[in-house]
Amino acid sequence: MVNEFDKKRAEEKGIQLSIKDEKMVPFQIRNDSIGQLYDDVVFVVKDEVLKDSQMLTCSYVADSDKPFPIGMEKEITKSIKLPLYASINVRSDTQQASISSSVTIIFALFYLSFVFICIAATIMATQQMMDATRQKYEYELMHQLGMDKAEIYAILRKQIGIYFFVPMILPVVYIFPLLYIVNLLFLRIPGNYSIYTVAFGCMLLYMVIYLCYYMMAYIGCKRSLDLK
């Protein structure tokens, strides 16, 4: 259960542990919760290396050729009478819990941002249709002075486009450092998955929704002009 964040951190620091000149290689690095300040690291060494060492605590580590099924953690806990403060951790259950927590967080963020973008786009579309109604006389005057419909509609598209897409400049600037920070947080979760795929998928969906509102505003404004 070595996650990419801890791998990279260990490589950057170049930490090497040894006992009696025997180099210790990490067998397992575990971090079960987001934001946890410490990791559990398991080392495997020869018996003779620890022959004269004093044992302060004891842990049992089991390996299997086949992955344990989800729910094995509860089954083992039920079948064994554990002493106080003892616990059993199974990789499949830990990953399942981490995935459930991640999905909950991602869905909550997705829902809030979806509601916000719909509200913002609705306000902007409504405002543009109201402005087009107030500016109807100016557009009709340009048409009477010889400007054809295609040129007027091109001006209308640019006007609505500026109103819609200028506010997107600031989010585009800060979204990439924000994604990097959030990705570092999610890399601590067992499972080693990146948030970039989910984030860019959501951004693509939001852009489609935003463009739909832009087209709705343009079509509404175009109809309100009703140039003959």
Image (cartoon, helix red, strand yellow):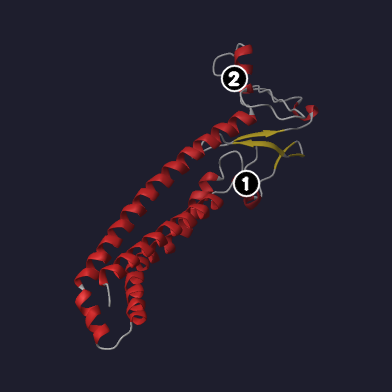
Instruction: Judge left or right: residue 215 versus residue 78.
Output: left
Give percent across and percent down for residue 17.
69, 41
- Using the rendered view, name the quadrant where residue 2 is placed: top right
Which residue, given by chain and number where applicable, does mark 1 sit on? 4
Indicate the amino acid at tag 1. Answer: Glu
Front in this rendered view, residue 29 or 51:
29
Using the numbered discs, state the Cα–Cα distance from disc 1 to disc 2 in whole angstroms: 28 Å
Which residue, given by chain and number where applicable, does mark 2 sit on? 74
Q: Residues within 10 Å of mark 2 (few under 14, many from 20)?
A: few
Q: Quadrant of the C terminus?
A: bottom left
Instruction: Judge left or right: residue 53 versus residue 93.
Output: right
Q: Quadrant of the N terminus?
A: top right
Give percent across and percent down for residue 123.
28, 58
Mark carried by residue 185: none
Question: What residue sits 73% from the left and 40% below the top?
Answer: 25
Instruction: Judge left or right: residue 4 versus residue 149.
Output: right
Instruction: Judge left or right: residue 141 versus residue 82.
Output: left
Element marked by disc 1: helix
- Badge nearest the viewer, 1 or 2: 2
Give percent across and percent down for residue 100.
52, 35
